[in-house]
Image: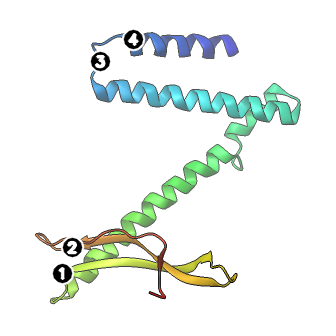
Amino acid sequence: MIQTIIEFLTVILELLKINKFSDIIRFILQSILNFIIFGLMYVIMQSIVLNSFQKGFETIFHPQSIIWNGQKELELDSKSTILTNHFMENILDLSETSSRVRLGIIHNGTAGLNGIKFLHFDIISAIAKPGRNPGPLLTNESLTK
């Protein structure tokens, strides 16, 4: 098993040395290589914790594994981003006088010198009608200014 993975990694490294590939193919090969290397690192780490290479390898495909949950979280994040953008586009379309829509989140910011936390906000998404500027995405701006 390990020998097969090492041979596969060697083939990918040899393919990356060839300059005939386009940038997209090179990017895909590098992404595959990174995924395999991080996966192996995860298996090795879990094998040490569980004292068994087989159990460490099985953790990748277990539904509660970090990799499995990370993939599900990315899918959920992309779906929620698409829904948020559709929602904001609908608001912009329904409002005749608005030229842009921005989505903000209010949260507890960093603690001040006296230990009191001040409210802050982030602008996490913004859209605008054609020809208009949606404005900057802001992070950790104070509401007390």
Mark 3–mark 1 CB contact (< 8 Å): no
Q: CA distance from mark 2 to mark 3?
A: 38 Å
The relative height of residue 20 versus residue 70 in the rendered view (above or below) is: above
SS for callout 4: helix
Tell me residue 21's x, y (percent). 29, 18
- Residue at position x 66%, y 85% from top? 116
Label 1 CA crowd tier, 10 Å (few <14, some 14–19, many 20+) = some
Q: Nearer the viewer, mark 2 or mark 3?
A: 2
Tell me residue 112's x, y (percent). 63, 79
Where residue 21 is drawn, which disc sits there? 3
Residue at the spot of label 1: 99
Q: CA distance from mark 3 to mark 1?
A: 44 Å
Mark 2–mark 3 CB contact (< 8 Å): no
Residue at the spot of label 2: 128
SS for callout 2: strand
Residue at the spot of label 4: 17
